[in-house]
Amino acid sequence: MAQTPEKTFYIETFGCQMNVHDSEKVIGTLLAQGYRQVQTQQEAGLILYNTCSIRDKAEQKVFHRLADFKKMAQQGKKFGVLGCVAQQEGEKIFDRAPHVSIVCGSASYRNLPEMLMQIEAGKQRVTGLDDRETDECFETEFTSRSNPHRGYITIIEGCDKFCAFCVVPYTRGKERSRTSASVLEEARRMADAGYTEIQLLGQNVNSYCDPSENKRFAELLAAVGEVRGIRRVRFTTSHPRDFGRDIVEAIDAVPALCDQVHLPVQSGSSRVLSLMQRLYAREQYLERIAWIKAARRPISISTDIIVGFPGENEEDFEQTLSLLDEVGYDSVFSFKYSPRPNTPALKFIDHIPDQEKARRLAVLQEKQKQIQSRNNQKHVGEVLEVMVEGHNPARGQWIGRTSQNKVLNFTAVDGQALLSGSYAQVRVTQAFPNSLVGELASGSAEVGINHFLNSQSRQLAF
Ligand code: SAH
Ligand code: SF4
Ligand code: F3S
């Protein structure tokens, strides 16, 4: 009897944490369908790209990649385009890349088994582009998390904000919150499987609203922080308009909630914020920063900034620079404005030359580097708890992450071995703009029982 050929897949992920976690859902779904994940495109029968469309560069990367692989299609390999470019371009992808077989947006991953069966049965092309309006449609039956200690949970999908520059409302559809009961159940299952850190995900977690119990985000956050075994909870992303004081109160009250808030501002100029349709002015943003700074815990603050939005003049840009000083961010993700399909800003005249956008970006990044240097310097002498993330043998250092989400590289005495996922107390001895350096505070390495579990069995557990 002829043996059925082995089904193998390779997946590459572009874009944000939501996409990274979506890929974990796709991987879990494919493994449950009898596919085996491989690490190179050469070995794979099915090649998947989970794509991002947030900036033009991200989108172009995918099309270049697809063009490069025409030859592989002749070898009988199948291609699938998933994620935000899939949702945005839909069937047009087949015109640009005729060797693609699957085009599927994030809300349709739970239909992948059915779609794969059709492809296996010889169908040339399948699409999954609907379902973006349904409640709770973004969960799949299986998830294969890549890290055995720290894992994501999606709590809300889509976005109703329609900022003038952003594709997300068009690629991920309208806001849908999951019930807090299902979020908490997933958190408990993860804790049982040995996870100690959870990151709650959504394009706008602050507008989370439990569809059955009317629970708000701060309540859900606190409840996840109280799940037994969970030591760290982070969340991303917060929209300033919906960022309530209750979130800061929850962080103050629940020890497991990390000392970290990511609050994207986009611009320091109220005029530009209004053009961007961000629904808040500089003053309101600063009011929220004041709440965070008034917390009893030392909360680190990070942000996203776009430079060169149509209409941004030198004075507006100066206001963004002054905001950096005023807030004193611990980290900033900054981008040159990139015009995106379907968005309102596409109609604005993008008069700022790329060279000028690049200059503003460089000025901003240099300024921020100095701010981070100063901020990090304040940690020297402190003893901070880190989750151990790995080892850098070349430097003889362990890599840890603090509650404030800062990387803290440290040495242990006499070559003491630490386990990834364990927690340790580390004394900070040096500070750089993007990391801290320290040494293990004596006798404080602590190993959780979880690390003895087989990570492979955990991968398949959900
Ligand atoms: N939901 C988040 C943002 C998600 S997108 C929020 O509201 O803040 C992540 C970041 O990408 C944004 O914060 C923004 O800084 C950047 N971004 C989004 N669209 C962009 C565009 N058209 N050009 C450049 N950067 C963009
Ligand atoms: Fe995009 Fe604005 Fe929604 Fe964030 S809040 S995802 S920037 S539309
Ligand atoms: Fe990109 Fe989609 Fe995330 S556009 S940033 S992958 S929501």
Image (spheres, grey):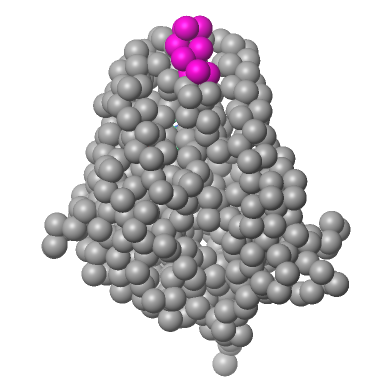
Q: Which residues are magenta?
A: 313-322
Q: Quadrant of the C terminus?
A: bottom left
Q: Is residue 304 left or right of residue 67?
A: left
- Residue 148 % position (x, y): 55, 72
**Farthest residue toward the bottom?**
1
- Residue 22 in view in this figure: no
**Residue beneath the point at 39% across and 45% down:** 295
Q: Quadrant of the N terminus?
A: bottom right
**Residue beneath the point at 67% across and 61% down:** 426
- Residue 185 % position (x, y): 31, 74
Near-viewer residue (118 or 337): 337
**Residue beneath the point at 67% across and 34% down:** 373
**Residue beneath the point at 27% across and 48% down:** 246
Near-viewer residue (91 or 176): 176
Near-viewer residue (183 or 221): 221
Magenta span contains residue 166: no
